[in-house]
Image: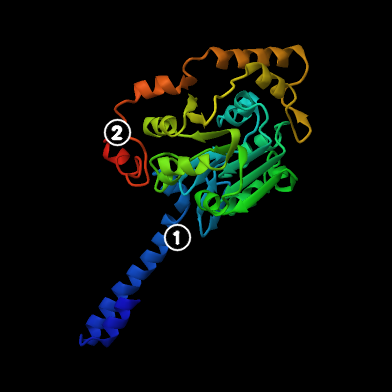
Amino acid sequence: MCAGGLIAAGQATRQDKIRLGGLAIAVLILGIGAIALLSQRLLENLQAKTLSDHDFAHIVETHSGIITVDTDGTVFGNGMYDGRFNTDLNSDRNGIIRPYALSLFHPAPRDVLMIGLSSGSWAQVIANNPEVSSLTVVEINRGYLELIATHDDVKSILHNPKVKIIEDDGRRWLGHHPDAHFDAVVSNTTYHFRANATNLLSSEFLDLVKQHLKPGGIFFYNTTSSRRAQRTGCIAFPYGARFLNHMLVSQTPIAWDYARWRRTLETYSIDGKREFASDDVDRARLDELIADYRQDSIAVESCPELLKATADQALVTDDNMGTEWRYFLHME
């Protein structure tokens, strides 16, 4: 259209104007057709980095970013994996064992703060822990609430009297509420190499969380297997260990109690449905689950062992931005 205007205003002959105008119209028609063709499944193609063969089940766009949900219930935040809609240990496709393990580390996690909501699966599990009295969730993107309301296995958290959901940045909220203290702070933090991930993994942030823990309180957060982030946790707190890809840290000794964990799992119920029934099959499954994690030396690594293994790793600080630059340069 711009070219057509220039052609009309130019000094070319009438015949040249007609020829060039026809060419401009042909390009316009071709462009309109190409846009219609190439814009099909734009977000799906960008995320898959190839031509996707299906549409997303849900797309939510807010000022905080774009949330997409694939047909299998996988959630993506701004194109990066951000969890799945699932609270069932029988089909643990999203590492849901981790929030279920809260009672393994703490005898009475009455008041819990969770930074980040995503699919709401973790919030659903923690809110239904029989020892939990209140769950405060800080989530910056309100779009997740829209998605949660459409999924039967998690939507009840939106009306659970135990749960309070606050729209804010987690670090900012902690800084603005110095008097808020919790038995447990949980953060299923995004990948350590993503932009701004250092805000939730640095030594400075760990010191901030430390100020919000009650006596005996724990901080349980995802390091996405970053050895730098894990070492930083062990340096910031006197007691801790790696559990799967999470760090568990505290200012007091952590009471790992598998018998207590089993008792909690036996009574676990979400929306009136027992996670483990009282029949022999579920009892055997529970026995196997507890035994696996009690004996699995890969799942648990104490801080002394971790510090020895990561002696060559630098700490994550606000100044060095963790791995946000170095990871993609293959420097670590």
Closer to us: 174 or 11: 174
Determine which quarter of the picture holds residue 104.
Answer: top right
Residue depicted at 56% across the width and 17% down the height: 293
Q: Is residue 45 left or right of residue 261?
A: left
Helix, strand, or loop for circle 2?
loop
Colour logic = rainbow
Figure quadrant of residue 186:
top right
* In the foreground, 200 or 83: 200
Instruction: State the image coordinates of residue 301 (x, y, percent, origin top left).
Output: 46, 20
**Residue 170: x percent and y percent?**
53, 49
Residue at 72% in and 14% down: 283
| Location of mark 2 (residue) | 332
Residue at 27% in and 87% down: 9
Relative to the observer, which residue lies in front, 66 or 206? Answer: 206
Asked if the residue at tag 1 contacts the one at tag 2, i.e. Cβ–Cβ closer than 8 Å, the answer is no
- Relative image position of residue 176 (x, y in whole percent): 55, 54
Three-letter amino acid code at the position of disc 1? Ala
Q: Is residue 283 visible?
A: yes
Q: Is residue 170 above or below residue 273?
A: below
The amino acid marked with disc number 2 is: Glu
Callout 1: helix, strand or loop?
Answer: helix
First in residue order: circle 2 vs circle 1: 1
Q: Nearer the viewer, mark 2 or mark 1?
A: 2
| Residue 269 appears left or right of 326 | right
Assess disc 2: are there few (<14), some (14-19) or many (≥20) residues with their C-alpha within 10 Å of its C-alpha. Answer: few
Q: Which residue is mark 1?
A: 36
Q: CA distance from mark 2 to mark 1?
A: 42 Å
Q: Residue 124 in the image: x percent, y percent? A: 67, 38
Name the quarter where the C terminus is drawn. Answer: top left
